[in-house]
C-alpha cells in the first residue's frame, strides 16, 4: 500500500508524495507558498505494463469509465486465432504454432486457455471491467480450468 499526500496551499500548488517500493517521490509547491493543508489518502499503485495507476483502498480506479487492458485484449485475440488454427487443422499442434509465432510452447498453451473463458469473463476483459489487479502476467501463471464456474471462482480472487 502506498501513501499519497496532497497539500493544497491557498489552492495555488499541490504536493504529491507516493511511496512505491520504498522510494519516495515529492512534488513541492513554489517557494512563495508558505501555508499548506495536507490531506492524506491511502492508495495503491498498480502497474499495468508501462502505466502506473492509482487505486483507492477498495481497489477502485480513479477514472470515469473503464478502459480495456490492451495487453490482455491482444492476448485474447491471439488465443482465439490460435484456437481457430488448431480447430481448422491449419496448425497441427501447439508446438507448430509456437515455431511459427516464435513463442515458447508452454507459454502459448497457457495463453490458449483465454480462448475458452466463460462469456461473462471474456466480456469483462474486452470492456475493461475485469478486476484491475488481473493482468496478463497473473493469467499466464494460472491453471485456468475449462469449467466456467471454476473460472469464475478463480477470477474472484482478484476482486479483492
Image (cartoon, grey):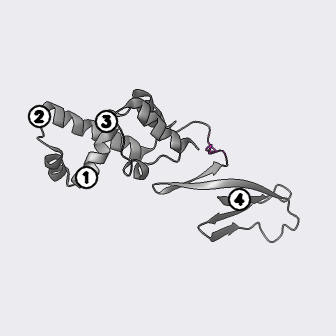
Inter-mark Cα distance, 4 to 1: 40 Å
> Of label 3 and label 1, which has the lower sequence position?
1
**Secondary structure type for disc 3:** helix
How far apart in space, not on screen, are marks 2 and 1 (Cα)?
A: 20 Å
| Quadrant assignment for the C terminus | top right
Q: Secondary structure at mark 1?
A: helix
Q: Which residue is mark 1?
A: 106
Q: Residue at x 22, y 52 (%)?
A: 105
Checking the image for residue 4, the label placed there is 4
Q: How many marks?
A: 4
Residue 90 x/y as whole percent = 11, 36
CB within 8 Å, label 2 to label 4: no
Q: Quadrant of the N terminus?
A: bottom right
Which residue is under mark 3?
115
Mark in the foreground, 4 or 3: 3
The alpha-carbon separation of the residues under discs 3 and 2 comes to 17 Å
Residue range highlighted in magenta = 58-63
Comes first in the chain, label 2 or label 1: 2
Q: Residue at x 62, y 70 (%)?
A: 22
Q: Main secondary structure of the magenta part?
A: loop
Amino acid at each position: 500500500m502506498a501513501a499519497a499526500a496532497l497539500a493544497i496551499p491557498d489552492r495555488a500548488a499541490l504536493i504529491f508524495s507516493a511511496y512505491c517500493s520504498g522510494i519516495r517521490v515529492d512534488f513541492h509547491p513554489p517557494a512563495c507558498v508558505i501555508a499548506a493543508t495536507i490531506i492524506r489518502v491511502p492508495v495503491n499503485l498498480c502497474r499495468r505494463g508501462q502505466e502506473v495507476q492509482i487505486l483507492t483502498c477498495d481497489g477502485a480506479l480513479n477514472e470515469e469509465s473503464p478502459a480495456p487492458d490492451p495487453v490482455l485484449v491482444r492476448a485474447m485475440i491471439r488465443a482465439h486465432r490460435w484456437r481457430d488454427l488448431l480447430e481448422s487443422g491449419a496448425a497441427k499442434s501447439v508446438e507448430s504454432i509456437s515455431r511459427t509465432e516464435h513463442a515458447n510452447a508452454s507459454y502459448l498453451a497457457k495463453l490458449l486457455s483465454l480462448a475458452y473463458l466463460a462469456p461473462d469473463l471474456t466480456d469483462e476483459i474486452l470492456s475493461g471491467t475485469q478486476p484491475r489487479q488481473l493482468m496478463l502476467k497473473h493469467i499466464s501463471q494460472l491453471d485456468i480450468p475449462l469449467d466456467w464456474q471454476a473460472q469464475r471462482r478463480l477470477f474472484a480472487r482478484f476482486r479483492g
